[in-house]
Structure formats: structure tokens, C-alpha cells
Amino acid sequence: MRRPIRWLAGILAVLVVSASVLWLKRDWMIAQVYIHTMEWEERVESLSVGRVLEVMALVPGQRVADIGSGTGLFTRPFARAVGASGVAYAVDVNVDLLSHVEKTAREQQIDNIRVVRAAYDDPLIPSPSIGFSCAIRCITSRTDKPTFPPLVAS
């Protein structure tokens, strides 16, 4: 009788440890899925990045916040549009996605992207003068939809 109980206790311990590791790595796993699925060609086309830029009419020197930046799909074009004298903030709650944004910005030699790790209920943008903020599908999967303070100054 003791052997099956030890065996069962061992299996239970492995399951508990595995579940704990997965819970601790959930942001990393979510980031990996986003990185490998969010920028495929059809999705990029469906989001009309160029049209969004056209409507926003960003100009050099502006500050823009991409709230829920994910992989930086919009952040990079925003940064290019506002130029070296402007700033594009990549705002997300997932630190692994923000690391990806920093990495792709370096690879593409974009120097005016600043990453901001947001809280779930506050974007925590450090600058008081954001010209535009853009939040495209950043909270659609949340069940407790937060209300961010207004950020658009113009």
C-alpha cells in the first residue's frame, strides 16, 4: 500500500511543480505565440497599418503612445513617422513582448522607441505631452476591461 501512495505523491509533486513553472512562464509563452503569429502578411494587411498612419497624420517631433503594443507592429511605423526628434512609446503589460520590441527596433536601427511596462489599469506613460495614443485591439481578450485615463492631447 505504501508504494502506490509514494508513487502517486511523486506524480502529484511533479504536476504541481510543472503547473507552477508554466504559471511563472505564462507571459513568456504568450509572447512567443504573439511573436510568431501577430505579424503574418494577411493580418498586417487586415490591420491597415498604412491607413492608420495616414489618418493619424503624425509629423516629426511628435510623441505617440502605442498602448497594447504587442510585437511593435504599429510602434515601429509610428517611430519612423515621428522621426528622430519624436518618440514612440511601446506600452504593454508583457515584459517579454517589450523585449521583442526593443530587439526589433535595434535590428531595424530605430532609436526613438521607448518601452513602458504598463499596469493592467494604467498605461504608466512617463511623458506629460503625448500627441496621440493608439490602442488597437489591446484589451479585447480581457474580461475585466480597464478604463485608461484620457491621453490624447490634440
Image (cartoon, rainbow, N blue to C red):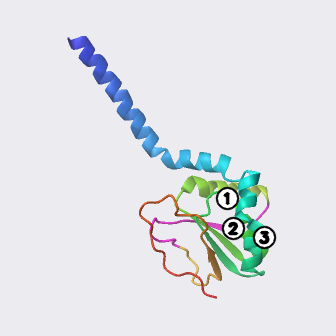
Residue sitting at x 70%, y 54%: 103
**Range of residues picked out in magenta:** 109-124
- Classify mark 1: helix, strand or loop: helix
Q: Is residue 113 magenta?
A: yes
Identify which amino acid the numbered label 3 is placed on.
Answer: Arg
Which residue was labeled with disc 1?
A: 102
10 Å neighbourhood of mark 2: few (<14), some, or many (≥20)? many
Identify which amino acid the numbered label 1 is placed on.
Answer: Glu
The percent position of residue 141, horizontal first and vertical second, equals 50, 58
Relative to 5, residue 14 above or below: below
Which residue was labeled with disc 2?
A: 113
Q: Report whether 12 appears left or right of 94.
A: left
Q: Earlier in the sequence, mark 2 or mark 1?
A: 1
The secondary structure that most of the magenta stretch takes on is loop
The percent position of residue 110, horizontal first and vertical second, equals 76, 64
Which residue was labeled with disc 3?
A: 80
Relative to 8, residue 110 above or below: below
Identify which amino acid the numbered label 2 is placed on.
Answer: Ile
The percent position of residue 50, horizontal first and vertical second, equals 78, 69
Mark nearest the camera among 3 and 1 is 3
- Classify mark 2: helix, strand or loop: strand
Mark nearest the camera among 2 and 3 is 3
Q: Are marks 2 and 1 in contact (CB under 8 Å)?
A: yes
10 Å neighbourhood of mark 3: few (<14), some, or many (≥20)? some
